[in-house]
Image (cartoon, helix red, strand yellow):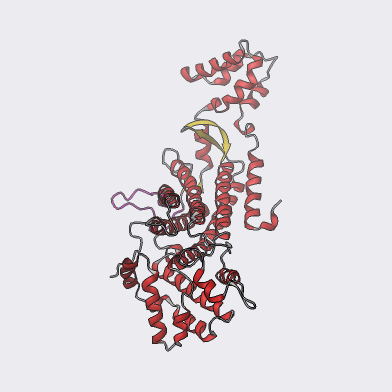
Amino acid sequence: MTDADHGLLSPAWAGTPVAAATGDAALVQAMLDVEAAWVAVLADAGHCGQPDADALDAAADASLYDLPSIAARGRDGGNPLIPLLADLRRELGSQGAPASAAAAVHRGATSQDIVDTALMLLAVRSGAIIRADLARAADALEALAARHADTLCVARSLTQHALPTTFGLRAANWLSGVVLAGRRLDEALDAAPLQWGGAVGTLASLTDAVGPDPAEGAGVADLTAALAARLGLADPGAPWHTNRLPVTGLGAALADVAAAAGKVAADVLVLARPEVGEVAEPVAEGKGGSSAMPQKRNPVLSVLLRSAALAAPNHAAQLFLAAGTAVDERPDGAWHSEWPALRELLRLAGGAAEKLAELASGLTVDPEAMARNAAMGGDLLVSERIVSRFAPLVDGGKAEVQALVKRSLEEGTALRHLLRSAVPADRLSDSELAEALDPSGYLGQARTFIDRAAAGNAAWQDPRKEP
């Protein structure tokens, strides 16, 4: 048994690819990758030898290090990089690396440079997984929207039956949220920056070693730009160690992913209630069962999606709180509080994206149940249209039509009978009355909005299709 966090109490992300991509081993690997990349940049610029860079590549393997020991010793310096550096230099020695390799490690950098950059690297790597799952979910939602573009159902506002809509439009609205979250995630990941500032953000040590304006070769700005390019991160042009908005921006985008997925789950949880019965989650062996009630088929995917949506905002708020209370050139605790919050957001967004793709791909839709529920309100389902369409035809105008609607509700009399009695046939034929009360004729721009949502998905997944 180990003390590793396998997510026993976090089923929203446990066992997902993002869980592995954000684990302690992945974080240690990211920190080692940053250190190795920096020595490679220095070697390319002639500030250390190629054998030094080769030695770092060999030693930059997280499996070579005792993670529980690093975590325990990290308490003494307040971050895990300090003990990892000691172990890295020891590993270089044990592998017979030249002494210059150990001297090249971490040259001109500080712990915050490595930790911040490693977290950005971790986010970019995890973000690729999240984006792929979001794209799968979006495609599945687009297919649902197209398949049910004409499937009539009731729209509900404030829990009550409101007007007719289509399930296709509902799915298209889900799709639009997922695509917008995906775009925001893309923007945050594309902007994920290298952090490289040295002890207090001046890069004084590196400048002293390289020279403020070298006559030939790479200067400080060239070195940091090369490091950003090697790691696949944005080059911010200057350290951002006291400006935590890169972290809050990333956190907000991840929270958007959880929120977009949570909206789908919230609707499915309502629509999957037995008394509603309009949708059902995909059936899979071992999923949705109850330990005490064998007849139950729990919508566990939606439950876990909802749990992620409920949890994510608190972690995002922690990032904003830390950013807004950061002091000096390295905050006294605010910086440290970001780490677990950002990692949990990556995990929650990753778990949500994976489960959303599974839910959307296998969601069962029951058009008959939708028609049955829509019919519960009878002609009142198009009461908005009735008021505007019939007010000019009825003595008393709008007030009288509203009174007829109220009478229908109180007496249980079909509204069409009351309207037929109130409007002379020479002013409105039976066929015109039937047409006015047909909910399938009162769907506005539903089809257009479905098409636009599909086009938005195509443009997101293939920017060449942008209008």
Indicate left or right for 434 with 363 as reference. Answer: right
| The residue positioned farthest toward the top in the image shown | 395
Closer-to-camera residue (393/5): 5
Which residues are the magenta region? 282-301
Indicate left or right for 172 with 248 as reference. Answer: right
**Height in image: 378 above or below 247?**
above
Quarter holding residue 434: top right
Residue 437: percent from left, percent from top: 61, 26
Q: Residue at x 56, y 71 (%)?
A: 227
**Height in image: 360 above or below 422?**
below
Closer-to-camera residue (322/393): 322
Closer-to-camera residue (238/247): 238
Q: Residue at x 46, y 18 (%)?
A: 410
Residue 344: percent from left, percent from top: 41, 57
**Quadrant where the N terminus is found in the figure:** bottom left
**Height in image: 53 above or below 418?**
below
Q: Is residue 37 visible?
A: no
Q: Is residue 278 magenta?
A: no
**Height in image: 64 above or below 453?**
below
Residue 310: percent from left, percent from top: 41, 47
Q: Is residue 407 visible?
A: yes
Residue 6: percent from left, percent from top: 35, 64
Numbered circles on residues, count? 0
Q: Is residue 295 magenta?
A: yes
Closer-to-camera residue (437/35): 35
Overall secondary structure of the magenta section:
loop
